[in-house]
Amino acid sequence: MQEAFFTSKQAAEITGCTLRQLQYWREKEVVVPTISDTGTGRSVYYSRSEVMELAIMEYCLGVGLNFEVAAASVKRLKDEGLFKSTDEKAPQRFMLWWDSNKRKLELVEFDLSKAHASLDEGKPVIPMWLDVIYQQLVNKMHS
Amino acid sequence: MQEAFFTSKQAAEITGCTLRQLQYWREKEVVVPTISDTGTGRSVYYSRSEVMELAIMEYCLGVGLNFEVAAASVKRLKDEGLFKSTDEKAPQRFMLWWDSNKRKLELVEFDLSKAHASLDEGKPVIPMWLDVIYQQLVNKMHS
């Protein structure tokens, strides 16, 4: 991604989200654009990492997850500063994995044998591979 | 399950759903109780297979899926008449599996190697094991 910032329209196009979704997530403080002046609504710009956040939302909702799980996943990844380091050594592959003790989905680092074991017990696994999602974004920007 | 029919309250308790959910799903025609007279709302009774439908809804929502995916899964299983045959030779294990061509989740028979292959490619798999869900219901009724 060459440009540092993207308008709402650009961000929506690249990620496959609708402008309505972007606005809703802004209101809900799930993905808040860096530059967001009040007024006409034109001065809204998403940084590269925020576009990645949008892409993760879209991915989560696209695989059938509800809003809360999607938003919580983005928040977790954001808190760990992962969107800032897409081309560095930070872990890139995660999964929503069913924690049988807590009886809820947990975002953990992707581990293939752990993932397989989970399926063997009939528990859901939703991979979240940031590198793949990132690559799809880059491809879309060049298409 | 000894009894043939369950009141809303019983059905909610057994499945872990709320009465509000039951009402909403009735309105949306996702799970419609066999006996449902108009009037006081007291004459609502769920059959065994309808209680299983509720349990599947609860399972789907519990693993973070959105309402549409949950409702579509129940509908698919219902259309195939699966809830009527929980103790027979009908397939009992399914999964929501990411169809890369259609780019959406599909309900298919559970196949462990297919499920593993899906994870290997970073695609989600949400098992839906009716026998296990059924067993949990039975356990709850006896606890």
Image (cartoon, coloured by chain):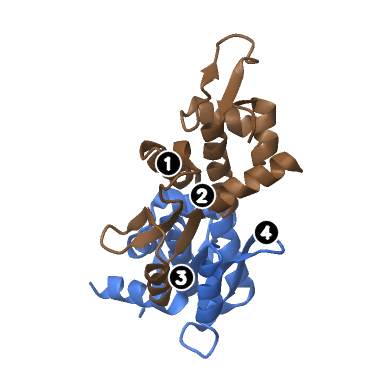
Chain colours: A blue, B brown
Q: Mark 3 sits on what residue?
A: A52
| Residue identifier under label 4 | A103
Q: Earlier in the sequence, mark 3 or mark 4?
A: 3
Label 3 to label 4: alpha-carbon separation: 29 Å
The mark closer to the camera, 1 or 3, is 1
* Amino acid on which the number 4 mark rests in the picture: Arg
Residue at mark 4: chain = A
Residue visible at 53% across and 24% down?
B33
Above or below residue B98? Residue B66 is above
Coordinates of residue B45 in the picture (x, y in percent):
59, 22
Residue matched to label 1 = B82
Give me the residue at 42% from left, 41% from top: B82
Q: Residue A81 lies in what quarter of the image?
A: bottom right
Q: Chain of mark 3?
A: A
- Whether discs 2 and 1 lie on one chain: the answer is yes
Splitting the image into 4 quarters, where does residue B121 fall?
Answer: bottom left
Callout 2 crowding tier (Cα within 10 Å): few <14, some 14–19, many ≥20: many
